[in-house]
Structures are given as C-alpha cells and as structure tokens.
Amino acid sequence: MDVSAILRQIDEVSQDWARSRRARQLRTTLVKADFERLELCGYLKLTVPIVEGGLWDALSTAVRPICAGLRSLSSGDSSIALVAAMHPAVLSYWLVSSPDLKERELWQPQFKMICETVKSGNWWGTITSEPGSGGDIGKTSAKATKSGPGGVFDYRLSGDKHFGSGSGVTSYMVTTAIPDGEEHADWFFVDMRGVPWDGSRGVKCLAEWDGQGMKATQSHAFAFEEFPATRLGWPGHLSEIVTRTGGFIGCLFASVIVGIVDAAMQEAKIYVEGLDPRRAFEAVEWARAQNEYWLIKQAQEGMIRAAEQQLDSREEVLHGKIAISELAEQVLLRLCKVIGGGSFARRSPFGNWFEDVRALGFLRPPWGLAFQTLIDRIPRKDPSQSAS
C-alpha cells in the first residue's frame, strides 16, 4: 500500500461519513470503529518510518499527503479528523529529532518501541494543556518524580491537565511536566490503555468534554496523581524538539479547518442556486465568502510549501494559521447569513461548522500566544543608539 492508495481510501471513507453527517454532527462521543477503519486504510503507516515498515521518509515529503488526508477526513467528520491530526503531530517529536550520537543510544530504543506501538494499531494524542497556562507548554505546574529503581526514563506524573483530545480512543498521550530537581519543563508520555478514570490508579476524569464545537473529540480534563510516565529519550531538549518539527503541527490543524470550509462551501452552493436574484445582500455575501475561501486555500498552500522547503517554517505557518482562523470564521458567518436563521437548527450542518472552525484559533498556539509570538519577532531598535 502506497501513499496515494491510502489517500484514495481516506477519500472514500470521508464520502461515506458525509452521507451520515447529520447524525455525526450530533454526536458527543467518539466511536472506536471509526478509528479502526482509518487504520485499515493505512493512515497509521504514514507516521512510521520506512526503515520500520511504514511510509514516513521525511517531514518535507510527509506534510502534504498527511494534510490532504486530514482535509478530506474533516469534510466528512471534523471531530475524528482533529483527533487523527494529534497522532502525527505528537509523533513528529520523534520522527524529526536527531539527538547527538551519545544520546542516540537511549533515543533509538525508545523510538523503535514507539514505532511498534503504532504498527500494533495504537493511536497517540496529547494532553499537554493546563488551566491557567495560556497555552504555553513551558508554563506547566505538573511535576514528575523518579519512580525508583526502574528505567532511566521512568517517572511518576502529578498535576491537572485538560484538552486531552481523543480520550478513551488514544492509547498514549504526550504531555509536559517539570522533572524532580530541575527548573524547566520537559516532555513525557503516558500509557492510558485500560486505565480507569476514577482515580483508583492515578488518573481521575475532572470533566468530560462538552464543547460548543468539535463536540465529539472527547477532549476531557484529568487529574494525575503519581501516574507512571515515561520521559522522552532526549531529556532537556524540549525547545529543540519543538523547533525541529518546524511548522508541521500547525499545517495539520489548519488542514482540519480547511476541510470543514470545503464541505460548507460545497453544501452552500445548493442554497445559493435557489436564491432570489433580486436579493442583493445574499449575493454579495456569497461573493465575499468565495473570495475568502480562495484566500484560505492560498494560505494553506503557502503553509505546506514553507514546511516542505524550510527546516523551520514556524513563522510562515503561524501567519497562515492565524489567517485561516480568521477567514474560516468569517466565511461560515457569511454562509449562515445567506442561508438564514435555519442555519442554526440542529438539523443544519452550518451552525455546527460555524462552531467547529472557531477551534483553530484556540489550537496550539492559541490566540494570545500566537500574536505574542509574532510581536516578539518584530525587530526592536536599541534605545542606546540615538539617531544621528
């Protein structure tokens, strides 16, 4: 099975899901059978290196097909697509990192083990966000203590986390914590397979996801108490690991939203064809939506090209992500105006899509952190250098 064959099967699955869109948009839970179907399509192979029996060669060659698959999936079921996006996002930490030769002796066995989990059908996700952190992964209050005479990377995690997208479906989740005796946060992952959520084994569900948008992502909140966690095999390199992923993760999240806009524009055409040509307002709003949709597609293409061509495309991708966030909300608002009040009925997909696309602005990095990152990149004149 090659990449093109996988994408064709993903398209078929998405089209099938789109036929039951009304029922799917009312869901508040994930269905494991949907993820098993994606596994059969070969989606998980896209995140396993070629040397380990998968199809991942390099970030530059993987970003476009994975984004295409997620964009297609999202047009059928946006909640599943977002959870599916988390999988390559967190695995990219291992896929693109290159520790020094000495540290590689610890990194490679861990990486191989992780590849085996994926080949066995396990999904990976993230539960990094914390209340009050503002989306900054370095501002974690979670603690990680050594678990005793176990392996060098065996720890115990304690702290509150939320936005654990895919809870109950993902087998492993990546997170951050401050290791015992250290000052700065580092990466860890936890094995959530078969773990009860009642606190009896160190994991307690604080709140199930009840979001207005992406209703079925199961982005639950949890409290961890001395729960077994594994530190990434390249300790102390959190920033470098993130940097090496370039803009890959931002491209993935944006693709999910673009897929929703694809579906919304296609569905809206049915309504537009029946518009009274004398109603200028609806005609103008539709024209504006078409123009903004064009801009969304250009922004996504620019993001993907930057990720393909640059080792660190984070700034370009961040610009694209912000642009798509703002434009997607505007497009869906215009479509709802064109269609009228019926767009917010539960039986209509547009009200659901309107809430769904707003998620992109809050995905990492969220609005405040995103704009602060751009502001921090503005060149500043040294105040000690007076004008001549």
Image (cartoon, rainbow, N blue to C red):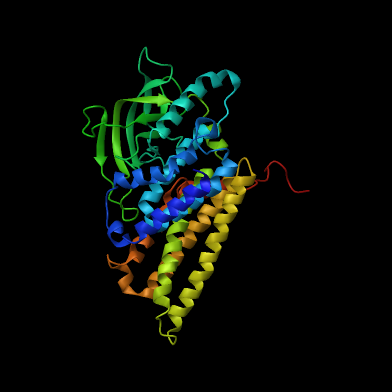
Q: From this viewpoint, is residue 251 visible?
A: no
Image quarter for residue 187? top left
In depth, the one of 261 and 24 nearer the eye is 24
In depth, the one of 4 and 319 nearer the eye is 4
Q: Is residue 178 left or right of residue 290?
A: left
| 281 relative to 72, above or below | below
Q: From this viewpoint, is residue 334 visible?
A: yes
Q: Position of residue 360 (x, y in %)?
A: 44, 53
Residue most extreme to the front: 1
Q: How many marks?
A: 0
Image quarter for residue 357? bottom left
Q: Position of residue 330 (x, y in %)?
A: 45, 65
In depth, the one of 270 and 33 nearer the eye is 33
Q: Residue at x 52, y 39 (%)?
A: 55
| 108 relative to 291, above or below | above
Q: Residue at x 65, y 46 (%)?
A: 379
Q: Residue at x 30, y 42 (%)?
A: 220
Q: Residue at x 46, y 54 (%)?
A: 71
In depth, the one of 13 and 372 nearer the eye is 13
Q: Position of residue 358 (x, y in %)?
A: 41, 57
Residue most extreme to the right: 388
Residue most extreme to the bottom: 278
| 220 relative to 97, above or below | below
Q: Position of residue 12 (x, y in %)?
A: 41, 55
